[in-house]
Amino acid sequence: MSRQPIETPDAPAAIGPYSQAIRAGDTVWLSGQIPLDPATGQIVGATAAEQAEQCMKNLGAVLTAAGCGFEHLARCTLFLTDLRDFAAVNAVYARYMPDPPPARACVEVSRLPRDVKVEIDGVAWRPR
């Protein structure tokens, strides 16, 4: 099985030595998305909810580039710098997810790249 990188200009370019996503067989492994505007590279949003909105837009762009959608997500991880933002971020996240939503973990971390408040990654399956 070979690994195929997934790249799109509709999501922020990687800010390190990683791909936006990797397809291996029918599985798509999506790197964490932080709230960067793909065109400018600038952080979008001051609140965790505003940042989560941009993270979801970026995640959606990578899913589309991989031939998938939110309905193909099997698992996500939400990284928050403050779990007190859980309800606000969860409300944004829920708007994007189909029923039933994917499996998920949400963890508080001490710091994220560019000092953002939210990062979201995922694993999806690619339909044939």
Image: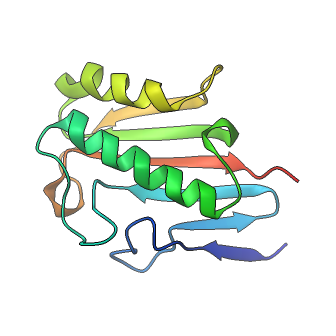
Location of the N terminus by quadrant is bottom right
Identified at 18% across, 46% down, the residue is 110
Image position of 109 (left or right of 126): left
Q: Quadrant of residue 71?
A: top right
Q: Please provide percent x and percent y for residue 33.
A: 39, 55
Identified at 79% across, 76% down, the residue is 2
Q: Please provide percent x and percent y for residue 56.
A: 42, 44
* Rendered view: 73 above or below 121: above
Q: Please provide percent x and percent y for residue 126.
A: 77, 52
Q: Quadrant of residue 93?
A: top left
* Rendered view: 96 above or below 6: above
Image position of 55 (left or right of 20): left
In depth, the one of 66 and 82 nearer the eye is 66
Q: Quadrant of residue 32?
A: bottom left
Location of the C terminus by quadrant is bottom right
Count of numbered marks:
0
* Rendered view: 51 above or below 28: above
Image position of 109 (left or right of 16): left
Identified at 42% across, 49% down, the residue is 57
Q: Residue furthest left?
A: 46
In depth, the one of 59 and 110 nearer the eye is 59
Task: State the scheme by which the image is colored.
Answer: rainbow
Q: Please provide percent x and percent y for residue 85.
A: 21, 27
Q: Residue furthest right?
A: 128
Identified at 61% across, 26% down, the residue is 98
Q: Residue furthest bottom?
A: 17
